[in-house]
Amino acid sequence: MGLGGWIARWPVYRQLTGADGRGAAARSARTDALRPRTAEADHVARSVCPFCAVGCGQLVYVKDGRVTQIEGDPDSPISRGRLCPKGSASKQLVTRPDRPSTVLYRRPHGTEWESLDLDTAMDMIADRVVATRRETWQQTFDGMVVRRTLGIASLGGATLDNEENYLMKKLYTAMGAVQIENQARI
Amino acid sequence: MAERMGFFTDTSVCIGCKACEVACKEWNDVPDDGFLFRATSYDNTGGLGADTWRHVAFVEQFTRQGDSWLMASDVCKHCTHAACLDVCPTGALFRTEFDTVVVQPDVCNGCGYCVPACPYGVIDRRRDDGRAWKCTMCYDRLRGGLEPACAKACPTDSIQFGPLEELRARAGERLDTLHGAGVAEARLYGESPADGVGGDGAFFLLLDEPEVYGLPPDPVVTTRDLPRMWAFAGTAALSMAAAVALSFARRA
Amino acid sequence: MAECHPVGFQWVMEAKARGAEVFHIDPRYTRTSAMADAHLPIRAGSDIVLLGALIHHVLAGEHDFREYVLAYTNAATIVSEDFRDTEDLDGLFSGFDPATRTYDPASWAYEAGGDVSGAMSEGEHAAQARLHADSARSDQYGSGGATAHHRARTDPTLRHPRCVYQVLKRHFARYTPEMVEELCGIPRADFRRLAEAVVANSGRERTTAWVYSVGWTQHTVGVQYIRAASILQLLLGNVGRPGGGILALRGHASIQGSTDIPTLFSILPGYLPMPDARMHGDLDGYLAHAAGDTGFWGNKRAYMVSLLKAWWGDAATEDNDYCFGYLPSVTGDHGTYATVLGQIDGTVKGYFVVGENPAIGSAGGKAQRLGLAGLEWLVVRDMTLVETATFWKDGPELETGEMRTEDIATEVFFLPAASHVEKEGTFTQTQRLLQWREKALDPTGDRRSDLWFYHHLGKRIRRRLSEDDVDRPLRDLTWDYPESGPHDDPSAEAVLREINGTGPDGRALSGYTELRPDGSTTCGCWIYCGVYADEVNQAARRRPGGEQSPVALEWGWAWPANRRILYNRASADPEGRPWSERKAYIRWDRDQREWTGPDVPDFERDKPPDYRPPEGATAQAAIGGADPFIMQSDGKGWLYVPAGLADGPLPAHYEPHESPVANSLYGTRANPARREYRRPETPYNSARFPYVITTYRLTEHHTAGGMSRTLPYLAELQPEMFCEVSPELAAEVGLVNGGWATIVTSRSAIEARVLVSPRIRPLRVQGRTIHQVGVPYHWGWAGGGVVTGDAANDLMPIVLDPNVYIQESKAATCDLLPGRRPHGRALLDLIEEYRRG
């Protein structure tokens, strides 16, 4: 920085000459470079808020494989770009550093979590479903054909997608599980 | 210089949802402000600070005259005569092309002069890094033609952003509407260029005295006497600058 | 609404700016009250008194919208002379069997003027009704009512003493402003202001809307709360018209979708009932009972066969009943609370908990956790380590000594879930609108979507099958969704297309009227048929709101048939003319001979207003041109419900199961048909508990906190579990603002910070002061929360509405003590002392 620049950035000089610091000299290089980070997004996904059922439109900005911003979608005739505090906190919901990312396993009577790879966990769960279904199968009940198991139950939240609920109901029904419930009952 | 931009916060339609607080933090990456239950109505934020650039006040008024629960989202006022800026010795605080007042964190050295200078008690030093922080009116967003995060999120448009003159006109109309509807207590705060800070870049429509919301009734720029003082300080400073320049020149 | 649906509330503010008067009826003065023209504090659990008094006000003053009422409702229909009202039987309707605590609704039917309501004998009727009641079959009315004969006798003068209009008049005669004051605690003057506003804002030129949430549903008379609102709105002509309606504000992103495509035990997709082994048998038997033959439900065979074809494809043929026999049968209550008791009893071995946290979020927290501890295996899928996953490690029963980690045999799998931006799919929001979410990025680590999980679990299960008959439904299941991406994600669009259904040519169908009963069409959920019309994902449409009319037909897709206001035929008069130009919406265009307007008409487009069904017509052909309620078997709006409900044809006020107040209206105190579970794990309160307790949500949090307590930006806004009490109650109990209170019921005792506020107002009820305690239910002991606290649901009883098995979380009793609660054994001692009374 030359002398002129140094003096120009000295606040006293700035205050005296720049009338309340409006002068360009008050700005740092970082300040000059400021732009909304949304402008640098690689792409924007049009999404919907996952909290209540108003169904506010969200724009999800992604840069280098990370979500950099989630804000309201002004195009939505429902929400007109606005979000409540929960919707506004969606980025934290998705990006918070302590969000679990690995499978955890607790063996019967165990006192601590253990790690387990996803593939093994899936196989173990499938084994248990098949075994429990067999053990608890009811072909009849009180003399009536029921073709079911009361040994396997499910409770889903109401943030499940329709497609997810559909596969759940379809698979459970085919396996004969009837105690399939949802937050919608609660 | 672009048009002066500002906030008009119409508290008569504020529903106290605090979307502004969260949207601000998400955009500006402001840390949480602690997890303290304050037992002060629904306000667990307390007030503006280094880690809270929007704050919603909750005022319960249950009297014989009627019940009300006032809510108001407070923010930096972006004063016409901004004392924080006046006293900043490093040039970290500057006035933008939108006529807003912004701290540059890469310049701020944490001296803290600005903190007592603010007539509203807005600007504050962050505990861990010591630097001063406050609302930037989302300066980065403004430079990209976007509105500030709080105003965008606000579900009921209690926080409105736009050219200040337009907002003043709109606020006047809103005030007339409310007065016409019998809401005699409605008033504007910080809207007048004739006030002690030369008018706020972020002004409010309130439904009671400012004190009720924790706002100073008659804020005055703390550096009001500065021009006179500068006359002395400036002369001294310039002679000093000349001396310094001379010494540099000799070395060069 | 401002509290829990702030962005939706912008439209209330818009309406208010245009002159709408807003009333808020709630036990507490909330952020909604602050914006309303009037707040009416009400005793939790007394809403039917208020609504009944509004109905009485309308009927007594003849303020009803008579032309609408006569043409579009069953007001003129004559009820059987066997019917006895609660006025006759001191709070019971005719047909109650005290031994089973169920109703035989035979006597509620319309008069048998040669045509009987339904084709059953009385004995059959009673047996059916019991089965109906003991398996939450009312769930099937999510898209249309029960069956009644569509041409019962009527008296258009409304003078016949047994016509519905006169029955209503007698039934609600004692629901007076004085009774509102006595039971709700709402002063007469405040009631009058409300009643006058409702009447003044209804009719040809104006409409009134009612908005509710779980404050109406979570009661042992919850369904009848909504029924009461339906009666009022039908009498005032506020259904099917712009600005009218009874609007359920749903609290979860796709809770509407979760009933449309239900993960519920009692129904199949599209509100088709689950087969019940006791009444159904084969497909024909099922269809005979499933719904009426008239109205659009008359096409139920097409809906059902298309569903079976979607699930079992080529294996489903006419010869094998389209694999109807593959469906498991229910035989009673398999609801979530019965399931938990089954876990305690050891009959339920394995449990999937998917984006849910029953250890905190369901009533009777201790019973929930005892159930979890009784399982052999538990799979929890969530974005955070919810308490349901960690109960064995840190649950409150460990501290009290009721459980020991080493003793708990439950094997637990925790699988981290993908977030809403890491998968694609549709949510169905509160106005039945499906909106497609684009995927922003793939999830990292072991995080996967639930679609991925069930798809791959299904594949694994299918690899482990035997050749025997038990496994055949799984073997024959269509389960071949295309996979892509780094995790082999199944295509959500392929699933949505299957839900939409395909025609004989294999192309996506355009609407449910194209469904056929002969196996030539497939459809996974008939009410969603059309969401993939023209092979286009209609739910992904996003034409900006500013570029289309306020109805915004090109934003997402609403079921059914993209209609935005249901039953909108009622927005026109019987001749098809708008009731008024101010409230014009759908009208009959005489020249074009079709219904037209800014919305998709909820009516056959070319059915003229003067259409009269021929004798013996079925399905939609049986619905007249002036009958807007096309999903009803008679096309009418039902002021009186002759069939389909478990607890009466009309709403009657019953006290909550736990209440410090006697029923001033009848000798019958609480809903006689309510569903109780008398279990030691979850007992009911004695009279020792003097205060009313009600649970709710805050703007800053979400449900049991898994998606909000974990986020610092939300947690800091409401960091601690608290209770809201009036200054008077605080003084009575010795509570101080900012201090601690212990809240006690016979289930448990929890501690909460105290927020003393005049927003909670003591009410004068039956001449004495009734205090209400408000508790948000967002906290739990862990859950990955930045903030933690005691769980409100630990206090609440398991007692259910008899129609839909929703628990009474909105009104129970409790006691309050100053200070923090005891821990360990001392906590159990305290509760034991209360239980002894």
Image (tube, rainbow, N blue to C red):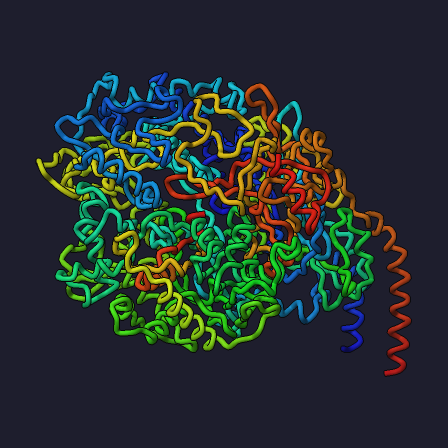
Q: Residue at x 27, y 52 (%)?
A: C275
On screen, residue C317 versus residue C544, left or right, reads: left
Q: Residue at x 50, y 51 (%)?
A: A82
On screen, residue C517 versus residue C35, left or right, reads: left
Can residue B201 be seen in this snapshot? Answer: no
Q: Position of residue C509 (x, y in %)?
A: 21, 59
Name the foreground residue: C75 vs C658: C658
Name the foreground residue: B69 vs C793: C793
Q: Position of residue C239 (x, y in %)?
A: 32, 34
Q: Quadrant of the C terminus of chain C?
A: top right
For residue C565, above or below residue B140: above
For residue B125, above or below residue B250: above
* Number of marks in picture: 0
For residue C775, above or below residue C669: below
Q: Position of residue C359 (x, y in %)?
A: 54, 54
Please identify the residue farthest to the bottom as the structure is shown: B252
Q: Which corner quadrant of the image does residue C748 belong to?
A: top right
Can residue C502 be seen in this snapshot? Answer: yes
Q: Position of residue C39 (x, y in %)?
A: 54, 30
Q: Residue at x 34, y 27 (%)?
A: C93
Name the foreground residue: C454 vs C442: C454
